[in-house]
């Protein structure tokens, strides 16, 4: 059962609300923002996906070449070697490519509803070999010593999790790939538990296992160990194909509350929740049986890739979670949830 209250102003941001950052491109999608407070404002770190304006009969998309420059690749849609059945990815002669290039970009707000572009802060683009297809879905962990950013690094050799740190959103320390392929959906807990850092992550195991949520610990956030699987996909249910963490877990009196996404075999993405033990987060206390949010609004059902609600950013005030989410892989929306109500639905 969907228990979220969507903002009546949804969608809050559409691709046409911003200007493209890569010359000659259009913004195809705004997706899955990281969320944080800074400088007395609310900020979204958007994932922006760009591509060239598409011409009839041709699919074209940008990649970084070996010199680190943007290069456009084009394929004839009638080419028998082309598999373009998924709007997000294409296959060509055994190679996979993304149809858009994603980077990260800041917008800010004073009321949490109206967001404006922040050109003072330059976009964060992918850099180097491991990010030649872009960077995506950044979680922002707001911690005592600044902001810790975990995001998906995409290239022909890997999908893995990168880490960056910043205190001022202008200079960034790049820490490279912390969870090697195939891995994404990494959310660092915003405080230590008994002296250790923790992070949820989502490796994919191609033969045994699947796309499950794992937990790991670290002395410094750069080196991770003691990996354990804490939540699998569930046969016959709304999260039967894949599950992955949302934003940093929320500390509540009952445990760490994590809002996660789950998809079924039709790539329909819903949200559910997990409750983890406060002292021993490897122990799952309870989990959603039914989704707490499902793609129901028109903007969640139709778009670049329909039937998707996906979150990796939220703000918490008392019992209220304000969730920012990507709908249909195209627009940014907001919704509110009650922590108590979520917990009362878990089994
Ligand atoms: C999947 C989707 C896309 C994403 C790629 C690479 O295909 O989540 O949105 O671009 O993976 O991470």
Image (spheres, helix red, strand yellow):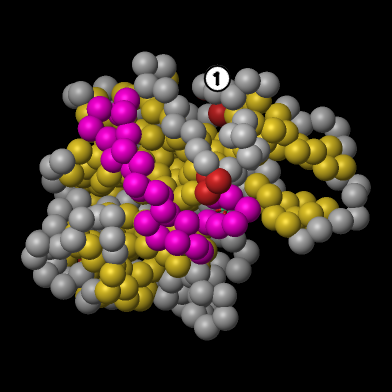
Q: Which residue is mark 1?
A: 19
Q: Nearer the viewer, residue 330 or 5?
A: 330
- Percent across and percent down for residue 288 are 34, 69
Seen from this angle, which residue lies furthest top?
120
Q: Is 183 in the magenta?
A: no
Residue 179 on the magenta segment: yes
Q: State left or right for residue 65 relative to residue 189.
A: right
| Quadrant in the picture for the N terminus | bottom left
Whether residue 50 sits left or right of residue 221 in the image: it is right
Magenta residues, start to end: 154-182
Asked if residue 339 shows in the view, the reply is no
Direction front: furthest residue: 67
Q: Nearer the viewer, residue 129 or 10?
A: 129
Residue depicted at x 63% and y 20%: 23
Provide residue 236's location: percent of width, then percent of height. 53, 78
Q: How many other residues sit within 10 Å of disc 1, few (<14), some (14-19) or many (≥20)? A: few
In the rendered image, residue 306, in percent from the top left (x then y), is placed at 61, 49
Q: Is residue 4 above or below residue 241?
A: above
């Amino acid at each position: 059962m969907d228990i979220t209250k969507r903002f009546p102003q949804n969608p809050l941001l559409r691709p046409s609300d911003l200007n493209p950052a890569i010359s000659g491109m259009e913004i195809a999608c705004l997706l899955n923002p990281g969320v944080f407070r800074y400088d007395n404002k609310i900020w979204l770190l958007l994932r922006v996906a760009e591509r060239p304006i598409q011409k009839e009969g041709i699919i074209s998309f940008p990649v970084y070449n070996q010199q680190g420059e943007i290069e456009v690749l084009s394929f004839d849609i009638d080419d028998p070697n082309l598999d373009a059945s998924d709007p997000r990815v294409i296959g060509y002669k055994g190679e996979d490519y993304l149809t858009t290039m994603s980077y990260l970009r800041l917008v800010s707000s004073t009321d949490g509803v109206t967001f404006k572009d922040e050109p003072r802060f330059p976009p964060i683009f992918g850099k180097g070999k491991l990010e030649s297809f872009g960077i995506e879905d950044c979680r922002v962990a707001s911690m005592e010593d600044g902001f810790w950013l975990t995001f998906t690094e995409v290239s022909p050799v890997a999908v893995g999790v990168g880490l960056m740190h910043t205190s001022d959103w202008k200079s960034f320390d790049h820490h490279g790939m912390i969870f090697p392929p195939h891995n994404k959906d990494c959310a660092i807990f915003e405080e230590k538990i008994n002296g250790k850092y923790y992070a949820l992550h989502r490796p994919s195991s191609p033969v045994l296992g699947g796309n499950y949520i794992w937990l790991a610990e670290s002395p410094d956030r750069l080196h991770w160990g003691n990996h354990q699987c804490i939540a699998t996909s569930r046969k016959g249910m709304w999260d039967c194909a894949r599950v992955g963490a949302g934003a940093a877990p929320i500390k509540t009196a009952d445990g760490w509350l994590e809002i996660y996404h789950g998809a079924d075999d039709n790539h329909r993405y819903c949200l559910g929740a997990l409750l983890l033990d406060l002292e021993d987060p490897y122990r799952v206390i309870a989990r959603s049986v039914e989704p707490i949010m499902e793609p129901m609004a028109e903007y969640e059902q139709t778009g670049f890739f329909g039937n998707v609600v996906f979150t990796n950013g939220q703000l918490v005030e008392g019992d209220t979670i304000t969730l920012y989410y990507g709908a249909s892989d195209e627009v940014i929306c907001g919704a509110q949830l009650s922590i108590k109500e979520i917990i009362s639905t878990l089994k």
